[in-house]
Image (cartoon, rainbow, N blue to C red):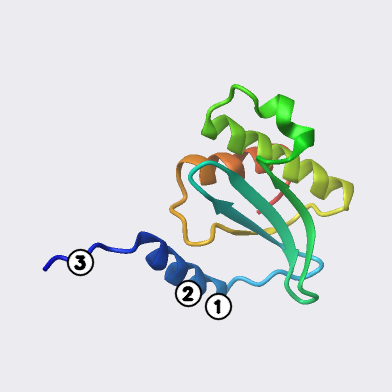
Protein backbone atom coordinates (compact mmCIF):
# COMPACT_ATOMS: atom_id res chain seq x y z
CA UNK A 1 0.00 0.00 0.00
CA UNK A 2 1.23 3.48 -0.85
CA UNK A 3 1.50 5.82 2.10
CA UNK A 4 0.89 9.53 1.72
CA UNK A 5 3.81 11.78 2.63
CA UNK A 6 3.21 14.19 5.48
CA UNK A 7 4.72 17.36 4.04
CA UNK A 8 4.23 19.33 7.25
CA UNK A 9 6.13 16.69 9.25
CA UNK A 10 8.97 16.91 6.72
CA UNK A 11 8.93 20.72 7.05
CA UNK A 12 9.11 20.46 10.85
CA UNK A 13 12.10 18.13 10.59
CA UNK A 14 13.86 20.58 8.28
CA UNK A 15 13.02 23.41 10.69
CA UNK A 16 14.50 21.56 13.67
CA UNK A 17 17.63 20.73 11.68
CA UNK A 18 18.11 24.40 10.74
CA UNK A 19 17.23 25.66 14.23
CA UNK A 20 20.26 23.82 15.61
CA UNK A 21 22.38 26.41 13.79
CA UNK A 22 20.21 29.55 13.84
CA UNK A 23 19.97 31.35 17.17
CA UNK A 24 18.69 34.85 17.89
CA UNK A 25 20.30 37.13 20.46
CA UNK A 26 19.31 40.55 21.72
CA UNK A 27 21.81 42.19 19.33
CA UNK A 28 20.86 40.02 16.34
CA UNK A 29 17.40 38.51 16.91
CA UNK A 30 15.74 35.84 14.79
CA UNK A 31 13.06 36.73 12.21
CA UNK A 32 10.74 33.71 12.18
CA UNK A 33 8.10 33.24 9.47
CA UNK A 34 5.08 30.94 9.60
CA UNK A 35 2.84 30.39 6.61
CA UNK A 36 -0.57 28.80 6.73
CA UNK A 37 -2.86 28.28 3.76
CA UNK A 38 -4.62 31.58 4.39
CA UNK A 39 -2.29 33.77 6.48
CA UNK A 40 1.34 34.77 7.06
CA UNK A 41 2.85 35.41 10.47
CA UNK A 42 6.23 36.97 11.27
CA UNK A 43 7.99 37.39 14.61
CA UNK A 44 11.31 38.80 15.71
CA UNK A 45 12.49 36.69 18.63
CA UNK A 46 15.27 36.96 21.22
CA UNK A 47 16.11 33.29 21.91
CA UNK A 48 18.40 34.06 24.85
CA UNK A 49 15.54 35.52 26.91
CA UNK A 50 12.78 33.60 25.06
CA UNK A 51 10.93 36.82 24.23
CA UNK A 52 9.08 37.94 21.13
CA UNK A 53 10.25 41.49 20.45
CA UNK A 54 8.05 42.35 17.45
CA UNK A 55 5.31 40.51 15.61
CA UNK A 56 3.04 41.05 12.63
CA UNK A 57 0.51 38.98 10.73
CA UNK A 58 -2.32 39.19 8.23
CA UNK A 59 -4.96 39.07 10.98
CA UNK A 60 -4.08 42.43 12.55
CA UNK A 61 -6.92 44.95 12.63
CA UNK A 62 -4.45 47.82 12.02
CA UNK A 63 -3.50 46.31 8.62
CA UNK A 64 -6.99 45.26 7.61
CA UNK A 65 -7.51 48.15 5.15
CA UNK A 66 -4.10 47.66 3.52
CA UNK A 67 -4.61 43.92 3.08
CA UNK A 68 -8.16 44.03 1.75
CA UNK A 69 -8.38 42.96 -1.89
CA UNK A 70 -4.74 41.85 -2.11
CA UNK A 71 -3.54 38.41 -3.08
CA UNK A 72 -1.38 36.30 -0.75
CA UNK A 73 1.92 37.46 -2.27
CA UNK A 74 1.01 41.13 -1.86
CA UNK A 75 -0.14 40.45 1.71
CA UNK A 76 3.21 38.83 2.51
CA UNK A 77 5.00 41.91 1.16
CA UNK A 78 2.91 44.18 3.37
CA UNK A 79 3.70 42.01 6.41
CA UNK A 80 7.42 42.17 5.55
CA UNK A 81 7.30 45.96 5.39
CA UNK A 82 5.29 46.15 8.62
CA UNK A 83 7.65 43.90 10.58
CA UNK A 84 10.64 45.92 9.37
CA UNK A 85 9.03 49.22 10.41
CA UNK A 86 8.15 47.84 13.83
CA UNK A 87 11.70 46.53 14.21
CA UNK A 88 13.14 49.95 13.33
CA UNK A 89 10.98 51.49 16.09
CA UNK A 90 12.60 49.08 18.57
CA UNK A 91 16.10 49.89 17.18
CA UNK A 92 16.51 46.48 15.53
CA UNK A 93 18.29 46.75 12.20
CA UNK A 94 19.95 43.34 11.79
CA UNK A 95 18.26 39.93 12.11
CA UNK A 96 18.84 36.27 11.33
CA UNK A 97 16.22 34.95 8.90
CA UNK A 98 14.47 31.73 9.91
CA UNK A 99 12.25 30.42 7.11
CA UNK A 100 10.96 27.61 9.37
CA UNK A 101 11.65 24.81 6.92
CA UNK A 102 9.68 26.37 4.07
CA UNK A 103 11.21 26.66 0.61
CA UNK A 104 12.53 30.18 -0.03
CA UNK A 105 10.02 31.06 -2.73
CA UNK A 106 6.62 32.74 -3.18
CA UNK A 107 5.29 34.24 0.04
CA UNK A 108 8.41 33.54 2.13
CA UNK A 109 10.67 35.24 -0.42
CA UNK A 110 8.21 38.13 -0.88
CA UNK A 111 8.14 38.79 2.88
CA UNK A 112 11.94 38.63 3.12
CA UNK A 113 12.54 40.95 0.16
CA UNK A 114 10.00 43.48 1.45
CA UNK A 115 11.66 43.45 4.88
CA UNK A 116 15.04 44.02 3.25
CA UNK A 117 13.70 46.94 1.19
CA UNK A 118 12.21 48.46 4.34
CA UNK A 119 15.62 48.43 6.01
CA UNK A 120 16.21 45.14 7.80
CA UNK A 121 19.59 43.54 7.16
CA UNK A 122 19.97 39.76 6.88
- Neighbor class of circle 3 (other Cα within 10 Å; few <14, some 14-19, many 20+) is few
Return the x and y of residue 106 as percentages of the image width and height: 46, 40
The quadrant in which the C terminus is found is: bottom right
Give the quadrant of the N terminus. Answer: bottom left
Task: Tell me whether the residue at label 1 lies in contact with that at label 3, contact meaning CB atoms closer than 8 angstroms.
Answer: no
Residue 17 picture location, percent across and down = 48, 74
The image's mark for residue 3 is 3
Residue lying at the far top in this picture: please name it.
Answer: 69
Cα distance between the residues tagged 2 and 3: 24 Å
> Which quadrant of the view contains residue 51?
bottom right
Tell whether label 1 touches label 2 (CB within 8 Å): yes
Residue 119 shows up from this direction: no
Whether residue 74 is visible to the viewer of this picture, yes or no, is yes
Extreme front residue here? Answer: 1
**Residue ID at (73%, 63%):** 45
Q: Which residue is mark 2?
A: 17
Q: Residues within 10 Å of mark 2 (few under 14, many from 20)?
A: few
**Residue at x 50% of width, y 68% of height:** 15
Amino acid sequence: MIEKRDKNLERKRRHLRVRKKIFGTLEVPRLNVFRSTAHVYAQIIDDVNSVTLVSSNTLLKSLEKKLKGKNKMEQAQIIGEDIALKAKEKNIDKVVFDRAGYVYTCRIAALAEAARKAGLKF
